Image (tube, rainbow, N blue to C red):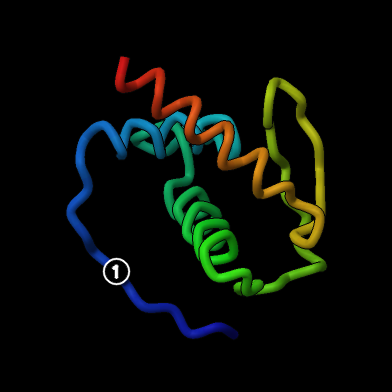
């Protein structure tokens, strides 16, 4: 089993709103206080960011299936097939809307 460590950090409200908006699409939850699974959402964001900035694959899990909703299309993809550029474009679009 993977060892996990708690990480706490301060986050600007507008960034947290963007994280929750993305999480509500990717990992909706009727029981979670913020309407989504923030842990899964943040792990996706951090993983995609590290991959985009370094070119390294982080926590490669080819057997994990993700349900993603990008540009209005819902699909299931393996970790290897996730289109990171499309995800970043969706995040940037949301951030732009929140800033406006």
Residue 56: percent from left, percent from top: 62, 74
Of 100 and 39, the residue lying toward us: 100
Of 96 and 8, the residue lying toward us: 96
Secondary structure of residue under mark 1: loop
Question: Residue at point 55% right, 83% down?
Answer: 2
Q: Is residue 88 left or right of residue 68?
A: left
Residue 67: percent from left, percent from top: 72, 42
Displayed quadrant of residue 95: top left
> Which quarter shows the N terminus?
bottom right
Q: Name the residue under label 1.
A: 7
Question: Residue at point 50% right, 58% down?
Answer: 49
Residue 35: percent from left, percent from top: 43, 31
Residue 84: percent from left, percent from top: 66, 49
Would you place residue 55 above or below residue 97 in this image? below
Question: Residue at point 34% right, 21% down?
Answer: 98
Residue density around tag 1, few if under 14, some if 14–19, many if 20 or more, within 10 Å: few
> Which quarter shows the C terminus?
top left
Residue sitting at the far top: 100
């Amino acid at each position: 089993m993977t060892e996990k460590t708690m990480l706490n950090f301060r986050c600007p409200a507008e960034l947290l709103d963007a994280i929750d908006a993305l999480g509500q699409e990717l990992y909706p939850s009727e029981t979670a206080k913020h309407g989504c699974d923030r842990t899964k959402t943040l792990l996706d964001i951090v993983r995609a960011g590290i991959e985009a900035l370094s070119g390294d694959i982080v926590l490669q899990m080819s057997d994990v299936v993700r349900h993603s909703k990008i540009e209005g299309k819902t699909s299931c993809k393996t970790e290897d097939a996730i289109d990171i550029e499309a995800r970043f474009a969706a995040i940037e679009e949301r951030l732009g809307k929140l800033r406006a």
